[in-house]
């Protein structure tokens, strides 16, 4: 069994904190019960705690003594009565070894163990309950300094993290391909989403990384569509499936869009090819020491060129870009950092401001790409009625849009294509292994109609 690198993650965080001594203390999540019920909410571990511990179970805590480089796990004690219902847990030493700690104690010993270290400062998170530290350590608690160093540590993935994210991507990619082979006209979006969940759970994924999207036709114009309850009633439509599994609590985030019928309709193919060109050119451009914002701007340029060829846009390319016209067709950013959280932390380092322009205002990261960062690359084009109606009333934007052509393509709804890439020393490594070329998709879709 591979040992979780908890101590290394603590040490990385402590290095970012840049202090010679003190204790880092974090607590995991607790089981929560539905009101007026004895039924538990499904438990998902706090992401910061998981990063520093690798523990998925509720009721744990962890600490790190900076000066002595000592990682300490505090285990939730399970009584004999509780064990009847949930099983006998591993021993303290088994927990210690599995998660890469130097010491392991029960949580009722937190105050005694940490007081003996006599820390001048206990660094913790703003939302952490510190009652178990006791009165003697209360004056030493700092709730503010830890969060940014911890987030910055999470931005840069180590070999363990990249390995599990690669596995999450493989599980999700395989599930997408199975859906492509099985989706048929007359099915319901719910069947597509349910099949994805079943496929990834069967591969030891504990849960979806986020609420899956299975959106046919016009539903794909809703960016975070989650109703997933409409019939796939037209072979002329496409279905957009944005779905990713977790593996060992690390996320994948993959989107594919394919025809409901065996082939793309001409209108759908037009828009799909533009989005595919956007994604391929952006991925090819990714690498160290480049700005993520520039990748978004490149996607906009490729989109504008494609939409000009179709006649949806008109006028000089540079004027279209200067007036952020593409932002009315791609209102979201080109992608985001991904890790334990699907929309992972660290996208906006301290002091970095958002740009309040169409498309750019929803960019989830503005920073330099560096080795071992993991990003999603997810361009899309959408025909969103409200946004395009707004565009009609803005002269600087409306003059570059042929709204008759927009009406012709409105039935497409939306297209998004999304992969997960690691920035390397020389470029990128694409973790996603799922077909996306038009001929590949149509070849797979033919299987569904044999």
Image: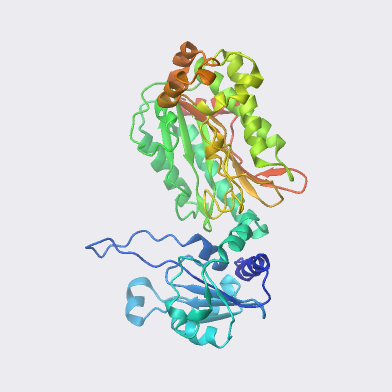
- Give the side of residue 291 with respect to residue 56, left or right: right
The quarter of the rendered structure image containing the N terminus is: bottom right
Q: Quadrant of residue 443?
A: top right
Q: Position of residue 385 (x, y in %)?
A: 41, 23
- Give the side of residue 179 with respect to residue 347, left or right: left
Residue sitting nearer the eye, 23 or 218: 23
Is residue 236 visible in the rendered structure shown here? no
For residue 123, above or below residue 338: below
Residue at (46, 11) in percent of width and height: 404
Residue sitting nearer the eye, 12 or 432: 12
Render colour scheme? rainbow
**Total residue callouts:** 0
Q: Position of residue 403 (x, y in %)?
A: 47, 14
For residue 226, above or below residue 314: below
Residue sitting nearer the eye, 123 or 444: 123
Q: Residue furthest left?
A: 36
Q: Residue furthest right?
A: 426
For residue 19, above or below residue 151: below
Q: Quadrant of residue 5?
A: bottom right
Is residue 243 visible in the rendered structure shown here? yes
Q: Position of residue 132 (x, y in %)?
A: 44, 79
Q: Quadrant of residue 392?
A: top left
Residue at (36, 76) in percent of width and height: 83
């Amino acid at each position: 069994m591979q040992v979780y690198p908890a101590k290394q993650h603590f040490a990385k965080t402590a290095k970012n904190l840049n202090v010679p001594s003190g204790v880092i203390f974090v607590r995991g999540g607790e089981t929560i019960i539905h009101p007026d019920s004895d039924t538990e909410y499904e438990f998902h571990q706090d992401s910061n705690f998981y990063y520093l511990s690798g523990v998925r179970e509720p009721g744990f805590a962890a600490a790190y003594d900076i000066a002595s480089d000592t990682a300490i796990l505090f285990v939730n004690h399970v009584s004999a009565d509780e064990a009847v219902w949930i099983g006998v847990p591993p021993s303290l030493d088994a927990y210690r070894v599995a998660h890469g700690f130097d010491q392991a104690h029960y949580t009722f010993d937190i105050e005694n163990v940490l007081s003996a270290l006599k820390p001048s400062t206990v660094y913790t998170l703003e939302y952490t309950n510190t009652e178990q530290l006791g009165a003697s350590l209360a004056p030493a608690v700092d709730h503010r300094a830890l969060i940014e160093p911890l987030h910055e540590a999470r931005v840069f993935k180590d070999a363990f993290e990249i390995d599990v994210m690669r596995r999450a991507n493989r599980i999700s990619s395989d599930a997408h391909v199975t859906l492509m082979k099985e989706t048929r006209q007359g099915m319901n979006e719910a069947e597509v989403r349910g099949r994805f969940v079943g496929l990834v759970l069967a591969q030891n994924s504990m849960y979806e990384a986020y609420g899956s999207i299975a959106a046919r036709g016009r539903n794909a114009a809703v960016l975070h569509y989650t109703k997933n309850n409409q019939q796939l009633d037209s072979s002329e439509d496409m279905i957009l499936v944005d779905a990713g599994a977790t593996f060992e609590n690390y996320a994948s985030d993959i989107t594919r869009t394919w025809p409901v019928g065996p082939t793309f309709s001409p209108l759908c193919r037009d828009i799909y090819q533009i989005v595919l060109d956007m994604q391929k050119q952006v991925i090819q451009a990714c690498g160290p020491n480049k700005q993520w914002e520039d990748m978004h701007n490149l996607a906009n340029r490729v989109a504008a060129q494609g939409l000009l060829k179709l006649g949806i846009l008109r006028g000089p390319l540079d004027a279209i870009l200067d007036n952020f016209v593409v932002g009315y067709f791609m209102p979201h950013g080109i992608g985001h950092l991904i890790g334990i959280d699907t929309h992972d932390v660290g996208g906006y380092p301290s002091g970095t401001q958002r740009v309040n322009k169409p498309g750019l205002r929803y960019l989830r990261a503005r920073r330099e790409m560096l080795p071992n960062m993991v990003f999603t690359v997810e361009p899309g084009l959408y025909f969103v009625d409200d946004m395009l109606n707004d565009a009609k009333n803005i002269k600087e934007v409306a003059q570059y849009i042929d709204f008759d052509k927009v009406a012709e393509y409105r039935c497409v709804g939306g297209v998004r294509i999304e992969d997960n890439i690691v920035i390397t020393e020389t470029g990128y490594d694409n973790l996603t292994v799922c077909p996306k070329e038009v001929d590949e998709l149509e070849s797979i879709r033919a299987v569904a109609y044999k």
